[in-house]
């Protein structure tokens, strides 16, 4: 496949690995923020190509994994409202809520539909005028503009039965929160597709104020090895800065149209992250002017205090403090077919990737 | 979730494009990337084109790495 195969060439990967081994002197910890990166690292066995001085830890960039238990329980409550169709991206339906999952509710008769694109949920709305469609909006800056575009389309077409339950989140506050909390990180492998939308300015504070390296990386093994090399060179030279490895897709200024859509539809609000608690101004709520598309405004739903699964250390894994093998349930009580925590549900969750490629 | 895959643009019809990934056809919304023409490669994410793939930067990244590789004295793996 063009733009994929070239970046999977073994001799190139090894060549970067050797250069990395030659330049790396200091012991450093790099966090890959994005779940897609975690998946690539495990899939291509990149850990084995790193010098012993460079350690990678996974961060909070898997949208399904960081969706709070409260959000999952809310989704469940909406699915029980008569006449409601839940439209959602695939993985979410398997996340265990406090008492049940969307998958189980669907077996009990709720109408829960998996969509590949938010645009399909607009179609469902048009084809089912007597029903109310609630789209579960999860994802970061890559995915949130799609939801924004759908809301703007729904407005243009005067659709009155399309609603969004937004758990969309933005990346910079959580990255800063981890640093402030004292998680040892020397540099970030920054998410390529998030940055394709936002541009690179969102990381300036991390580099300039916190003194951390930030390299925006693509998702193929050559990309990732090169990003790790760039970060290592920055840190060795004592010149942390924001750089783009993934230049074929990411530009400094990002995608202005997508940014405008985000601006038009959403506003920042405090948001709850699984295992990380509430992080100020880290979530995207729907603007007042568009509240007729906001599921939270349309339906009055209350859920009891949510409980996280007992023994699950997903929260510490999302903060880079622990790895799945530290969890007593990993691979025993908790497996991808029978997940206990959200990190085992999503294909890009750290527990699921460990299970798939290491066990 | 933030997964996006390079897809080739075959034809453009106002706000949507027909694209292919390994000969399989998909529709890509161009709502956030209106400026594409047949032959371009775009990154497809959940039904939307989110950004173009720049062929020059793509070649440049590889060229630099390959040059470095062939400049190494003890090449392995070939
Ligand atoms: S293995 Fe399962 S229970 Fe343990 S942290 Fe991961 S998701 Fe939670």
Image (cartoon, rainbow, N blue to C red):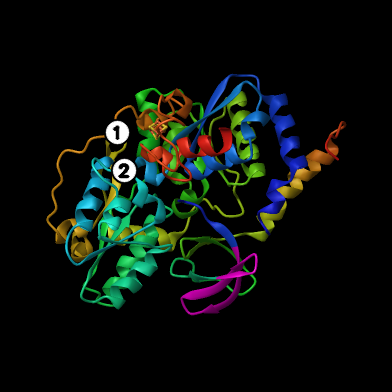
Judging by the rendered image, the residue that carries numbered circle 1 is A309
Badge 1: chain ID: A
Other residues around mark 1 within 10 Å, as few (<14) / some (14–19) / many (≥20):
some
The image shows residue A210, relative to residue A102, as above or below, that is above
Residue A343 falls left or right of residue B53: left
Q: Quadrant of the C terminus of chain A?
A: top right
Check contact, mark 2 vs mark 1: CB within 8 A. yes
Other residues around mark 2 within 10 Å, as few (<14) / some (14–19) / many (≥20):
many
Nearer to us in this view, A68 or A222: A68
Residue A165 falls left or right of residue A199: left
Judging by the rendered image, the residue that carries numbered circle 2 is A96
Residue A317 picture quarter:
top left
Q: How many marks?
A: 2
Q: CA distance from mark 2 to mark 1?
A: 8 Å
> Which range is magenta?
B7-25
Nearer to us in this view, A323 or A286: A323
| Residue at 65% over, 19% down | A25
Tell me if residue A110 is in the magenta stretch. no
The image shows residue A323, relative to residue A136, as above or below, that is above
Ligand 1 is located in which of the four quadrants? top left
Tell me if residue B12 is in the magenta stretch. yes
| Residue at 64% over, 69% down | B23
Badge 2: chain ID: A
Mark 1, ligand 1, within 8 Å: the answer is yes
| Residue at 38% over, 33% down | A176
Q: Secondary structure at mark 1?
A: loop
């Amino acid at each position: 496949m063009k733009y994929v195969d070239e970046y999977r060439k073994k001799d190139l990967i090894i060549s970067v690995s050797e250069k990395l081994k030659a330049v790396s002197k200091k012991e450093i910890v790099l966090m890959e923020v994005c779940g897609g990166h975690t998946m690539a690292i495990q899939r291509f066995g990149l850990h084995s190509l790193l010098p012993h001085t460079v350690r990678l830890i996974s961060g909070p960039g898997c949208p399904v994994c960081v969706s709070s238990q409260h959000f999952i329980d809310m989704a469940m409550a909406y699915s029980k409202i008569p006449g409601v169709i839940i439209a959602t991206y695939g993985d979410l339906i398997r996340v265990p809520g406090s008492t049940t999952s969307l998958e189980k509710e669907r077996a009990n008769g709720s109408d829960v539909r998996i969509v590949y694109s938010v645009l399909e949920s607009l179609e469902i709305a048009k084809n089912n005028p007597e029903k109310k469609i609630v789209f579960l909006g999860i994802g970061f800056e890559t995915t949130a503009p799609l939801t924004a575009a759908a809301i703007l389309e729904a407005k243009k077409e005067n659709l009155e039965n399309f609603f969004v339950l937004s758990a969309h989140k933005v990346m910079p506050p959580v990255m800063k929160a981890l640093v402030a909390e004292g998680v040892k990180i020397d540099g970030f492998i920054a998410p390529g597709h998030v940055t394709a939308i936002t541009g690179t300015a969102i990381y300036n504070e991390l580099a300039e104020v916190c003194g951390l390296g930030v390299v925006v990386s693509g998702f193929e093994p050559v990309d990732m090895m090169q990003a790790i090399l760039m970060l290592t060179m920055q840190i060795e030279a004592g010149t942390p800065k924001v750089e783009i490895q993934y230049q074929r897709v990411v530009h400094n200024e990002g995608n202005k149209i997508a940014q405008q859509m985000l601006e038009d539809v959403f506003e920042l609000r405090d948001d709850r992250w699984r295992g990380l608690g509430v992080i100020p101004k880290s979530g995207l709520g729907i603007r007042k002017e568009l509240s007729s598309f906001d599921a939270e405004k349309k339906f009055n739903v209350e859920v009891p205090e949510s409980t996280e699964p007992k023994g699950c250390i997903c929260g510490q894994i999302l903060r880079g403090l622990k790895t799945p093998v530290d969890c007593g349930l990993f691979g025993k009580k908790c497996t991808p077919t029978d997940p206990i925590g959200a990190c085992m549900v999503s294909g890009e969750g750290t527990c699921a990737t460990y299970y798939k490629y290491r066990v | 979730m933030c997964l996006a895959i390079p897809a080739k643009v075959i034809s453009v019809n106002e706000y949507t494009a027909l694209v292919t990934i390994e000969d399989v056809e998909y529709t890509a919304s161009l709502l956030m990337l209106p400026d594409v023409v047949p032959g371009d490669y775009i990154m497809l994410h959940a039904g939307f084109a989110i950004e173009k793939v720049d062929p020059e930067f793509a070649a440049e990244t590889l060229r630099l790495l390959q040059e470095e590789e062939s400049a190494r004295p003890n090449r392995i793996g070939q």
